[in-house]
Amino acid sequence: MKMIIEEINKIAEKIKRDISLMEVCGTHTEVIARHGLRELMPKNVKLTTGPGCPVCVTSQEDIDAIVNLALSGIPIATYGDMMRVPGYYGSLDQAREKGSLVFSVYSIEDALKLQKNYTNLVFFGLGFETTAPMTAYAIKKGLTVYSIHKLFLPAMQALLKIGELKIDGFLCPGHVSTIIGVEPYKSMKVSQVIAGFEVEDILVAIYMLLKQIFDNKTIVENEYLRLVKKQGNPKARREIFDVFDITDGNWRGFGVIPQSGLEIKNKYKKFNAKIKYKKILDQVDFSFSRKLTSCKCGEIIRGLKSPQECPLFKKVCTSENPIGPCMVSMEGACNVKYRYN
Amino acid sequence: MKSLNNNITLDHGSGGYASWELLKEIRGILKFKDKWQNTEDDGAVFDLGKEKLVFTTDAFIVDPIFFPGGDIGKIAICGTINDLAVMGAKPLGISLSIVIEEGFSRTDLMKIISSINKISVQLGVPIVTGDTKVLEKGKIDKIEITTSGVGLAKKIIQNNGAMAGDFIIVSGDLGEHTVAVLSKRFNYQTNIKSDSKSLNKELELVGKHLNACKDPTRGGLSANIVEIAKKSKVKIILDEKLLPYKKETIALSELLGIDFFSFASEGRFISSVSLKNVNKVLKILKEFNQEAKIIGRTEKGEGVFLKTKLGSFRQIEMPRGKLIPRIC
Amino acid sequence: MCLAFPGKIISINKNSAMVDFNGIKKEINISLTPDVKKNDYVVVHTGFAIQKMGKQDAKEALKLSSPSF
């Protein structure tokens, strides 16, 4: 490993100019911080965090919608990290403290089990292409879902299009790639390497990116060969598109990104919580959800600011009292920065 | 940072930063200590002249109540015996207070009492007084046990005596109590059993050679090593290559997304030992558990750091956020 | 959330497999990887196998996640 770090330093020196690499997967953010990789990088190589954490990119409106469903007596189940994200009406965890039925699950199979006892249970379905197939499977089994699933690539494309930040290369998400394969990334003309999740994987991927940049190449390489196959997982993708349509997605930090969201198809509409509970959702005042706050999560997930540049970081926003999702999620940039000094 | 929410949350019970902060506020009110000392340690101390009286208490809530390697009764009695032992005290007697939910199985209750009795007889530490209460169904989750204990010590083992140049020694692999409890709770199968056991035999032999000692229960290694470093005013550096965790422990940690540094052990201790005593201590501890080993060093300075396998340093802090409820 | 861990399939029962992750075993849903067989290694995410992993690679990955490596 010391050898890879040396090679990284050598090639960065040859490149000379400042290089900005963006990692767009929450687990990469965590592993990089846990091993202090930023300190080990050459001076001219900057690692920025992008919108890779599905909890962090969930819009305030979606949080407010699900919290209101919980407060109105509907049992809600979701993946753990989502429980503490605060919306205008509080978080799901706070709704639970007030007496609402809210369950944190590890697998959607647990939600299906819960539904046997709580027949009107709603699953808050978040995640990218990695978790969407599981939600699709569960909907086919009769689970009611409020879907905020998103497609990953449109966010990367939006970042490049907006051009606020110079991005010389992307460390691509390992598990999303397991599902979508390598091809989809080719639509973006920028250096990309799909990376695994051990620190060794990330170091090798960074080296591969720097080599591409040095050779002026903008191709897609796969470092995570042991898991990511060129064709991805076609069965998983079929499951997704059996149940979901592509629609516009509402992303924290980006606003609406066209063709980036997954909505439940008409043929499964009776399992769509947005339709089933339209009456309750129509009563919710979302004007507060759209208000601007001092929380800089939106800019942090676009890589424009680092957590320390948010006026609330550590002063008001802490992991005990998180203000924004980037501090709640274990893979959020702010939470990771807070935990790993 | 005081909580903006004025209610007690689950965070406050998990043994991490929020718990420590709550304790600070409570201690801020209960300042009257009279002649008692070490009131912020595992046990409080009353100087009797030739000997010192040590007094400790603990409440136990575990889900599930029965788990591989033990039950709530076993950890309740071992927990209190261990709190006395890590202070250097030989236990004299234990009190047992039980709050039971209406509808709880009487057979299960007697199973738990028998577990307690087994340890009591084995170690020669009697249960001398107690209380039971029953609450209506739904007002408490199954059962809660509180044990208090008194013991006598010739010399108190502090947890603030670590000195620069010491070695950090653990008495065995850590976190297996949490692995046993969480595997049962979340339906994983494993051969790992809870590490719940009493520590007084080992501590009788090595106690006098330890500069600081704690048993890493609630909050795990991170909470307890940070406390030793803070109280002793030293810097501690742990080596990632020497971390005392089995592959199963790491696997469960990854599968559940919970940091294994915060996994509790109910039959282990972490200690700071001077160079001159290291070999002696290790030799004795290895007779009880082959896995006893050195995991780090102390230096002048402050804070706890992990030297990663890459050679970089990462600070270990008091765990924050909601950790794992109902482990001990 | 991206947490995914490789494990070995011990037994299969229709859409479910018992998977051993370095000594921790759990029933995993294999409906997204229908071609897997006993003794294959799979990477699991939120209770579902998402892809098969080669034996050597899986063993290497499991070793990397072990302590004292």
Image (tube, coloured by chain):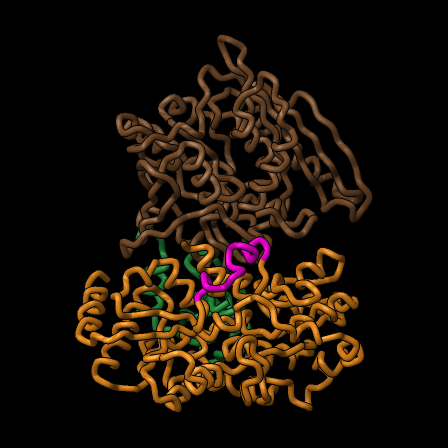
Residue A232 visible within the image: no
Q: For residue A217, what is the image quadrant? A: bottom left
Where are the magenta residues, as a range?
A306-321
Q: Colour of chain C?
A: green
Q: Is residue B76 left or right of residue A168?
A: right
The picture places residue A5, in percent across and down from the top left corner, at 23, 64
| Residue A131 against residue A320 in the figure, above or below | below
Residue B26 visible within the image: yes
The picture places residue A66, in percent across and down from the top left corner, at 69, 71
Helix, strand or loop for the magenta stretch, by majority: loop
| Residue A330 against residue B316 in the figure, above or below | below
| Residue B184 against residue B278 in the figure, above or below | below
Instruction: From the rendered image, report the letter of the chain displayed in brown.
Output: B
Q: For residue A175, what is the image quadrant? A: bottom left
Q: Is residue A42 magenta?
A: no
Q: Is residue A310 magenta?
A: yes
Q: Colour of chain A?
A: orange
Residue at 26% of width from left, 70% of height from top?
Answer: A44
| Residue A71 against residue C14 in the figure, above or below | above
Which quadrant holds the N terminus of chain A?
bottom left
